Amino acid sequence: MKRQYLAMMIGACCLIVAGRVAAEDAPPADPSSIDSKMQQSKAFIDKMSAMVSDGFAELEDARKSQNINRVNCVNDALTTMNGLKRLADSNYTALQECSSRRDSDCAEHEYVKVSIAFNKAEELQGQLKGCGGPSVDGTIDGRPYIEKNVDKDMPEINPTAGLTDLAPQIEVPPSASPFFKP
């Protein structure tokens, strides 16, 4: 859980820094391009939603195959993708606010953050698809696997053969109380 939280925080910081750098280097955009940025950002978020849905289907397949390594790999990538999608959703909301104010610099900044999140989600989707398939070791079917090695020098006789069971002779102990008589 801590590893997933740390990955999401690092991803968020990278998006913020990269968005600021890209926004500083970008030429000023005209207000008519804000609408195109809104449409493109919405398309990115829709594609990210589809990627996350595909990721959940892949996670279900991994669970059915009972391959622990594959489940962990898919789950890690899917958790990060889901966090990036939520981050892109919040950036899209901020983009809508910038659009309502007709602030092109702010819109550019938010658009860059959404596009970076989308690009990172695409990378994670490739990683998710590359997680081990059914041929990878580590499958579990619930039964223990017992390997038996027998030394050839060991005798094959039963060491308990010929012994008889001795029934113990149990007597009732005497009463400890003079007032209680059975």
Image (cartoon, helix red, strand yellow):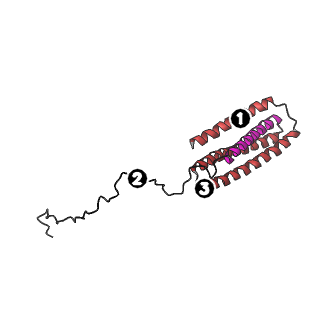
Q: Which residue is mark 2?
A: 150
Locate residue 146, reporting x and y percent.
46, 54
Overall secondary structure of the magenta stretch?
Answer: helix
Q: Residues within 10 Å of mark 2 (few under 14, many from 20)?
A: few
Residue 69 lies in the magenta stretch: no
- Whole-angstrom CA distance, mark 2 to mark 1, is 63 Å
Mark 1 — residue? 16
Residue placed at 75% from the left, 34% from the top?
19
Residue 122: image x %, image y %? 73, 44
Closer-to-camera residue (120/85): 120
Q: Nearer the viewer, residue 98 or 126?
A: 126
Q: Is residue 142 above or below residue 47?
A: below
Q: Depth check: 144 or 22 in front?
A: 144
Magenta stretch: includes residue 121:
yes
Residue in view at x 77 percent, y 37 percent:
112
Of marks 3 and 1, the one in the foreground: 3
Residue 64: image quadrant is: bottom right
Q: Callout 2, which amino acid?
A: Val
Q: Which residue is mark 3?
A: 65
Q: Nearer the viewer, mark 2 or mark 1?
A: 2
Q: Is residue 82 left or right of residue 103?
A: left
Q: Which residues are magenta?
A: 103-129
